[in-house]
Image (cartoon, rainbow, N blue to C red):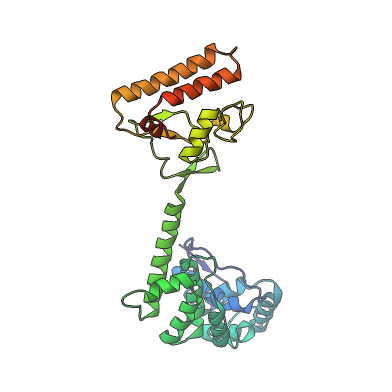
């Protein structure tokens, strides 16, 4: 703390101010911001009340933050008007000063303006918390009774959220309770949407993120055995039997090739639909099926010189030797 004595013998005590955020500069272009500006000034000076004790100090602080535009010109004119012959400033009372500022830059119809805005404000894509913050600001200026504010507030909510509150066994009766439940239900809904999308954000590298599902794909039954996957349309038993006897393709019904021949059906070679033998088959049946698959694989490897007709005949014979139950278990 330092004490400075002027030539006139006046004493001023200089103390360090606390590091609160100072008010935004006010230039008078937006009259709706005047109240916010004055409140910011009052808040800062209240936090530094050990410095701003006299009206002159408070007024000087506000004037120093009125810069540019009409507000800057007004502040300069006010200072020059209050200068005494010895260049000592005496600004008068704080109350009178604030009244002068409000008269110069305040909205004369601030209450009506706020009410008009309240009637038209909507939640839209915002969270309920953001909507509530703006509504609170306007509500304090509109000076309406609770019932009027509730009407404006609930009709500004998104319809599903409003209906959620209307569905409560006991609806909120005060504006604060409307705020509370709107915020709660909106946050719950947004959390549910994140869960529903099945994605969580994880960091990959600096400044990058990737979404990964909460649940991975369901695991395959360890007791199930995969059989070659085929993309065969469901055929009637009679049609299937006919194609097997005549050596026709299960996919297109033409002769000379089989369903998984990539030359005739390029897409079918990738086996797009799975056929799975479910648990419950006896060991002998499973062993037989495995042996059949091995035989088919070996036949394919060792019979490259065979004609296509011979290959078709071989496959047909294998199928003909199978019982109906075995064919059903294989998905045919």
Q: Position of residue 36 (x, y in %)?
A: 54, 74
Q: Nearer the viewer, residue 180 or 33?
A: 180
Q: Position of residue 126 (x, y in %)?
A: 52, 65
Vertical comparison of 328 with 150: above or below? above
Q: Residue at x 51, y 76 (%)?
A: 156
Rendered image quadrant of residue 290: top left
Q: Nearer the viewer, residue 46 or 150?
A: 150
**Residue 223 seen anywhere in this rendered image of the structure:** yes
- Quadrant, the N terminus: bottom left
Vertical comparison of 244 with 46: above or below? above
Q: How many marks?
A: 0
Rendered image quadrant of residue 79: bottom right
- Quadrant, the C terminus: top left
Q: Position of residue 6 (x, y in %)?
A: 56, 71
**Residue 132 seen anywhere in this rendered image of the structure:** no
Q: Position of residue 271 (x, y in %)?
A: 52, 32
Q: Residue at x 60, y 88 (%)?
A: 108
Q: Nearer the viewer, residue 307 or 242?
A: 242
Q: Nearer the viewer, residue 51 or 248?
A: 248
């Amino acid at each position: 703390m330092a004490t400075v004595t002027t030539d006139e013998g006046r004493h001023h005590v200089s103390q360090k101010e606390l590091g609160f955020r100072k008010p935004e500069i006010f230039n008078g272009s937006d009259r709706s911001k005047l109240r916010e500006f004055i409140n910011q000034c009052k808040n800062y000076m209240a936090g530094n009340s050990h410095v701003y004790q006299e009206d002159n100090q408070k007024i000087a602080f506000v004037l120093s933050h009125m810069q540019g535009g009409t507000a800057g010109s007004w502040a300069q004119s006010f200072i020059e008007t209050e200068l005494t012959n010895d260049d000592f400033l005496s600004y008068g009372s704080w109350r009178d000063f604030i009244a002068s500022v409000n008269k110069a830059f305040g909205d004369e119809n601030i209450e009506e303006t706020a009410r008009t805005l309240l009637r038209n404000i909507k939640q839209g894509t915002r969270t309920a918390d953001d909507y509530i913050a703006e509504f609170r600001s306007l509500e304090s200026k509109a000076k309406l009774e609770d019932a009027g504010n509730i009407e404006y507030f609930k009709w500004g909510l998104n319809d599903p959220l409003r209906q959620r509150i209307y569905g409560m066994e006991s609806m909120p009766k005060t504006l604060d309770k409307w705020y509370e439940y709107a915020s709660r239900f909106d946050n719950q809904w947004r959390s549910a949407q994140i869960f529903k999308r099945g994605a969580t954000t994880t960091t990959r590298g600096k400044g990058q993120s990737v979404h990964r599902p909460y649940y991975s794909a369901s695991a395959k039954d360890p007791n199930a055995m995969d059989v070659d996957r085929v993309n065969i349309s469901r055929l009637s038993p009679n049609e299937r039997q006919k194609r097997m006897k005549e050596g026709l393709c299960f996919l297109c019904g033409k002769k000379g090739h089989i369903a998984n021949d990539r030359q005739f059906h390029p897409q079918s070679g990738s086996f797009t639909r799975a056929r799975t033998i479910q648990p419950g088959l006896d060991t002998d049946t499973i062993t037989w099926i495995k042996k059949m698959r091995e035989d088919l694989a070996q036949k394919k490897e060792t019979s490259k010189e065979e004609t296509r007709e011979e290959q078709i005949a071989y496959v047909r014979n294998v199928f003909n030797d199978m019982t109906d139950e075995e064919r059903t278990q294989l998905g045919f």
